[in-house]
């Protein structure tokens, strides 16, 4: 296993002091899967006090000392090394009631979540794999270490981590582990919302449609507003899926960015509330985009998402049903109001929404979206994104011609921008001035 020199040096320093040291967890799993690890966690038989003695003279980070973790500052960043430990119960479903330091790496690995994460590697001793993690990796199986119910009662976040790992690596969740995830579902209620958000986002970025469908009960426990969409028939000839099935398909089809995956998950969450059935038995969801946007805003507030992410997701959900003709006048206005990047994101979303219907019937809207994207790109390259900031005249130019300061300046500039966007005037200084002062 390749271990960076900055990490290997610290491991050797501990070994030379008579203290076993191992690389552990995700870096070992990734190495066995042929993935270059992004970070390296280490554990050691040395106690925190002993580590401070061994690393005397180095810059240390001691914030995690009570849990046995010492951070050592290196030229490549901080390397965290934790004393082998075992833990007591988890009364708050998050933190161990007590931590006891141990001398055996196997005792430390026994407290970890899944077998694929319960492996350690030492350059001197090789691989330590007491729970069959390597075999589970080979077979693509995600299995809890020991009693799965106990693992999830210790920290319910492991339930969502299981979903994320299964989606990310394409693992099949072992049957007893899956049963325990559902049996201990109530533990999700006690988790900090920001922890739920991080795990759900990681899951969404990796998820395929079948991952969302198989994990629907767990996801809906975290976002109860999604529950009514499960099994909700759309009674619409254009849709072959229920609302949740359609949602899962759209999530899988949009690019795996946070904005698009969250928007796809929440875009139809308001459909059950506005459903109507006409005399012909056709289902309709008038106004569902606005209702879904309001729900998305409340959900992301609750999950403590960043303001920037929440605002973008809400905008995408609110506008996902908008229809724009691929015409220059329309495209200029869209570029001016929203910019190319946001409009391309919306088009990605709308294309996935159409593709997620499950119907094989051709949709002219897909062609129009492709044409609109090309037109937006052409105009952006040729003319840029026309806004008041890029207008060829400013307020100072108008005042220099005698216009008095005040609201009339803004009114005149906005009027000029509208005429440029409509194609009535070129964005050229003299032409704009002549339009105001004929």
Image (cartoon, rainbow, N blue to C red):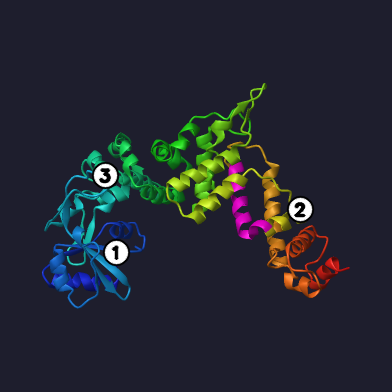
Residue topped by disc 3: 93
Q: Quadrant of the C terminus?
A: bottom right
> Which residue is at a point 13% across and 67% down the rendered structure image?
49
User: Relative to 400, does residue 152 appear above or below in the rendering?
Assistant: above
Of the two numbered discs 1 and 3 on the same chain, state the one appearing first in sequence.
1
Q: Disc 2 or disc 1, which is closer to the eye?
A: 2
Cα distance between the residues tagged 1 and 3: 26 Å
Q: Is residue 59 visible?
A: yes
Categorize mark 3 by other alpha carbons within 10 Å: few (<14), some (14-19), many (20+). some
Of the two numbered discs 2 and 3 on the same chain, state the one appearing first in sequence.
3
* Foreground of the two, 362 or 189: 189
Q: Is residue 252 visible?
A: no
Tally of marks:
3
Residue reaching furthest to the bottom: 57
Residue topped by disc 1: 40
* Foreground of the two, 58 or 76: 58
Quarter of the image where one finds residue 89: top left
Q: Is residue 307 left or right of residue 188?
A: right
- Disc on res. 327: 2
What range is drawn magenta here? 337-355
Look at the numbered disc 2 and give the secondary structure of its residue. loop
Look at the numbered disc 3 and give the secondary structure of its residue. loop
> Which residue is at a point 35% across and 43% down the rendered structure image?
172
Cα distance between the residues tagged 2 and 3: 56 Å
Q: Disc 2 or disc 3, which is closer to the eye?
A: 3
Quarter of the image where one finds residue 274: top right
Q: Quadrant of the N terminus?
A: bottom left
């Amino acid at each position: 296993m390749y271990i960076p020199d900055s990490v290997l040096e610290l491991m050797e320093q501990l070994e030379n002091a008579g203290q076993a040291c191992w690389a552990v967890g995700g870096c070992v799993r990734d190495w066995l899967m042929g993935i270059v690890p992004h970070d390296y966690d280490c554990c050691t038989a040395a106690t925190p006090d002993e580590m401070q003695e061994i690393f005397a003279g180095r810059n240390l980070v001691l914030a995690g000392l009570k849990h046995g973790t010492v951070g050592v500052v290196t030229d490549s960043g901080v390397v965290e090394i934790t004393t082998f430990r075992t833990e007591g119960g988890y009364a708050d479903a998050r933190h161990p009631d007590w931590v006891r330091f141990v001398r055996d790496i196997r005792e430390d690995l026994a407290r970890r979540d899944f077998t694929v994460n319960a492996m350690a590697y030492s350059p001197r001793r090789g691989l330590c794999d007491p729970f069959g993690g390597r075999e589970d990796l080979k077979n693509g199986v995600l299995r809890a270490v020991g009693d799965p119910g106990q693992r999830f009662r210790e920290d319910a976040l492991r339930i969502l981590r299981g979903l994320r790992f299964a989606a990310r690596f394409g693992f099949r969740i072992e049957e007893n582990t899956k049963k325990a995830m559902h049996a201990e579902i109530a533990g999700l209620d006690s988790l900090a919302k920001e922890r739920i958000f991080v795990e759900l986002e990681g899951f969404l970025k990796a998820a395929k449609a079948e991952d969302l469908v198989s994990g629907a009960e767990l996801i809906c426990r975290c976002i109860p507003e999604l529950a009514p969409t499960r099994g909700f028939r759309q009674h619409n000839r254009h849709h072959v899926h229920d609302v949740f099935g359609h949602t899962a398909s759209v999530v899988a089809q949009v690019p795996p960015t946070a904005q698009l995956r969250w928007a796809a998950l929440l875009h139809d969450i308001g459909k059950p509330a506005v459903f109507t059935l006409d005399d012909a038995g056709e289902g309709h969801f008038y106004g569902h985009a606005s209702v879904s946007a309001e729900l998305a805003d409340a959900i992301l507030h609750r999950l403590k998402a960043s303001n920037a992410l929440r605002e973008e997701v809400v905008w995408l959900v609110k506008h996902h049903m908008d229809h724009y003709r691929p015409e220059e006048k329309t495209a200029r206005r869209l570029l001016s109001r929203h910019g190319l990047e946001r409009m391309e994101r919306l088009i990605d979303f709308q294309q996935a929404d159409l593709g997620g219907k499950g119907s094989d019937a051709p949709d002219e809207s897909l062609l129009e979206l492709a044409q609109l994207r090309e037109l937006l790109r052409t105009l952006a390259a040729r003319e840029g994104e026309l806004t008041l900031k890029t207008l060829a005249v400013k307020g100072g130019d108008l005042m220099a011609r005698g216009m008095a300061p005040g609201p009339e300046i803004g009114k005149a500039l906005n009027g000029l921008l509208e005429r440029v966007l409509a194609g009535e005037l070129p964005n050229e200084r003299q032409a704009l001035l002549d339009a105001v002062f004929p």
